[in-house]
Image (cartoon, rainbow, N blue to C red):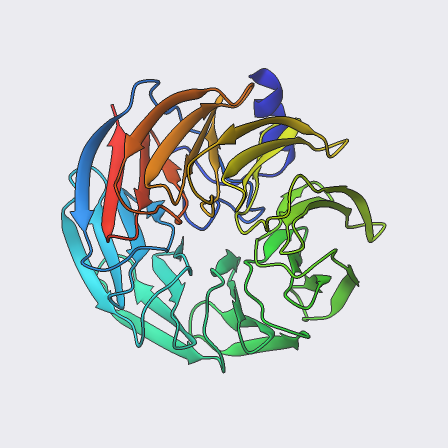
Amino acid sequence: MQLIAILVLAAGILNAAEEWPQFRGNPQLTGVATGNVPANLRRIWTYNADESIESSAAIAGGTVYVGSHSKDLLAVDLQTGKLKWKYRATDSIGESSPAVSGGIVYIGDLGGVLHAVNAASGKGLWRFNTEGEIKSSPVVSGDRVLIGSYDASLYCLSGGNGKLLWKVATGNYVHSTPAITDGVAYFSGCDETVHGIRLADGQESVKFPSGGYTGASMVLVGKRGYYGTFDNEVVGVDLVKQSILWRYSPSGFPFYSSAAFGGDRIVVGGRDKLVHAIDIKSGKAIWTFRTQARVESSPAIAGARVYVGSNDGRFYVLDLANGKKLWEYEAGAPLSASPAIAGDRVVIGDQAGNLFCFGR
């Protein structure tokens, strides 16, 4: 898939093959891995966190970091599945997923607190309190950390000491994770508005109607963005012209999953129980794959394969070209978290509290 490789580079993907340092793998939220995942997977290890894992894992320095409803941020050895340390948050960790940068792990909890934790030791470094629960995942750009909150604000903090640099208020919850390119953070909010906020000073440079109430995060491909909405659509937008490119409306069900970028297409899960591959130019369906329950897991792509969980309790591997099922694993509990891929391993958690690692 040479075209995919070229477009992945063009999108500005920054992570190395052995890393998946944040939600969706990189600041553009493309959900694309640069490593080689083996064609024939097997379960290598399982770690049980005792309570539901809706947080999507980050992988850095040979360690898997993930949050749990048990209030714990966990650090697990990627090779063995052995626990390295636990850090106790102030409240349950829901969908907020860790971001790892400069030896620090950042994660939000449902009590509205953003935590900074030493990645090697698990020692807390600082905490920052917002005024609403955090389901957004942190994104790091240079020495700045961005996080959305249900207090309807996007925050920018100093990564080193947690000092507030700026705060931007929106018209409703900031559920999604901001995607960053060229010094601007883009997100489509629950206020039905696409926002583009300059990292340098917190000034809004882009603002236009998003096409619907949005919980999913935007994937950036150059200066275009793609995201699903609770108005039962996937939307493509031009961030320069501040306009809607197309709307994909296959059924009367919302899209909560965040899309992955696969060359000439995006791949996204729907509450209609389908995984959808959509042409990024036309907004037309290329293929769909049916599961047995809603798909809230955000797909990841490595090479010519799509990796995605479903609330039917199965983890699927699909052919990116045609949507054919290549492999599945029955976890037995809903998988609403998203896969993380580093090197030749894939990690995902389920709502029974199991963290699975697949590889050769």
Q: Residue at x 49, y 63 (%)?
A: 136
Q: What is the x, y in percent for residue 82?
A: 14, 47
Q: Residue at x 48, y 80 (%)?
A: 130
Left or right: where 176 falls relative to 88: right
Q: Residue at x 47, y 48 (%)?
A: 296
| Residue 192 shows in the view | yes
Q: Residue at x 49, y 31 (%)?
A: 290
Q: Quadrant of the C terminus?
A: top left
Residue nearer the viewer, 195 or 205: 195
Q: What is the x, y in percent for residue 273?
A: 49, 40
With respect to residue 311, does 159 lie above or below? below
Residue nearer the viewer, 314 or 166: 314
Which residue is outermost to the right?
241
Left or right: where 193 falls relative to 36: right
Q: Quadrant of residue 327?
A: top left
Q: Quadrant of residue 214?
A: bottom right
Q: What is the x, y in percent for residue 167?
A: 61, 77
Residue nearer the viewer, 48 or 287: 287
Q: Quadrant of the N terminus?
A: top right
With respect to residue 350, does 174 lie above or below? below
